[in-house]
Image (cartoon, rainbow, N blue to C red):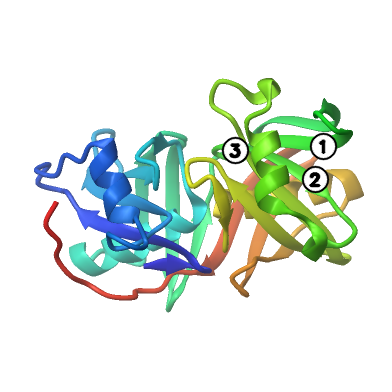
């Protein structure tokens, strides 16, 4: 499946029989010798009263707290294989996520963002940068730029992702260009993938909330990702806090199959 170009392998593991190690996950996600994906999602039985449990692994095999595009795909996948209603809830390492399905669009009720930090000075080897930071389920650095197409996302993103300020877990890095009063274009370097991806759901949320905080505007905000889709972020802004954050975007099936691991 893919959510705005961010692609995933989804596995029904309600029986609890699938146990993948880091090397197996990396091999499945390898675009030349495996299926090819930005990450793997396991659908499992819930343990805390929600409908399901979502486990997300980056393409390097490491487990991450949350993935916004993956969560939308997860919701459609769960609806298809478990024949659920149009509203479901599932637990993640970042907290409980609720989802509502409308045709091929999925709206997520995101966990409440934390650790908002604006105008932080970050010293790099060749320059100092002013960055913003927020945890929208996973940690995100957001950097406004004038011309997003001129950014070397892989080089600059890697340098910031591995900066000691964000150790030991690191952070995703987002570059945003304002395109309108409530619209930005976004490019994201994702930890775990260690490269630019076509979309990052929690990065979309982080970028929209940083725009709202720095420009003092209300939602919704539209975010154009590298994959060509435009996602919508809704929220209630209360001073420097954000409540009732939602992410709406596509989640599409690509193919089904089996593979030996």
Please state if 179 lies on the left or on the right of 68 as rendered.
right
Query: In the picture shown, does residue 137 fall above or below 258?
Result: above
Q: Are marks 1 and 3 in contact (CB under 8 Å)?
A: no
Q: Are marks 1 and 2 in contact (CB under 8 Å)?
A: yes
Query: Which of these two is toward me, 138 or 63?
Result: 63
Please state if 195 lies on the left or on the right of 19 as rendered.
right
Within 10 Å of the Cα at label 1, are there few (<14), some (14-19), or many (20+) other Cα atoms?
some
Please state if 33 lies on the left or on the right of 193 as rendered.
left
Alpha carbon separation for disc pair 1 and 2: 5 Å
Q: Position of residue 235 (x, y in %)?
A: 69, 52
Earlier sequence position, callout 1 versus callout 3 = 3
Q: Residue beneath label 3, please?
A: 112
In percent of the image, x 42 and y 63: which residue is there? Answer: 7
In percent of the image, x 44 and y 76: which residue is there? Answer: 104
Earlier sequence position, callout 3 versus callout 2 = 3
The circle on residue 131 is 1
Q: Residue beneath label 2, please?
A: 143
Q: Position of residue 150 (x, y in %)?
A: 81, 61
Mark 2 element type: strand
């Amino acid at each position: 499946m893919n959510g705005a170009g961010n692609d995933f392998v989804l596995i029904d593991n309600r029986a609890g029989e699938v146990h993948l190690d880091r090397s197996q996950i990396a091999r499945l996600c390898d675009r030349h010798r495996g299926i090819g994906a930005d990450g793997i999602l396991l659908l499992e039985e819930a343990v805390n009263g929600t409908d399901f449990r979502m486990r997300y692994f980056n393409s390097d095999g490491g487990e991450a707290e949350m993935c916004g595009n993956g969560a939308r795909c997860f919701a459609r996948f769960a609806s298809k294989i478990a024949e659920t209603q149009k509203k479901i809830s599932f637990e993640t390492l970042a907290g409980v996520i609720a989802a509502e399905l409308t045709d091929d669009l999925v709206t997520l009720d995101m966990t409440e963002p934390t650790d908002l930090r604006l105008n932080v000075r970050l010293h790099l080897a060749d320059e100092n940068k002013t960055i913003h930071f927020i945890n929208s389920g996973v940690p995100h650095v957001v950097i406004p730029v004038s011309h997003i197409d001129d950014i070397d996302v892989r080089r600059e993103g890697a340098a910031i992702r591995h900066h000691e300020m964000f150790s030991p877990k690191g952070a995703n890095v987002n570059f945003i260009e304002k395109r309108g009063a409530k619209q930005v274009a976004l490019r994201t370097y994702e930890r775990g993938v260690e490269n630019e991806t076509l979309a990052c759901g929690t990065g979309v949320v982080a970028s929209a909330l940083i725009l709202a905080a720095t420009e003092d505007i209300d939602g919704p905000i539209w975010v154009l990702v590298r994959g060509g889709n435009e996602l919508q972020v809704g929220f209630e802004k209360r001073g420097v806090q954000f409540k009732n954050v939602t992410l709406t975007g596509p989640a599409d099936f690509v193919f089904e199959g089996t593979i030996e691991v």
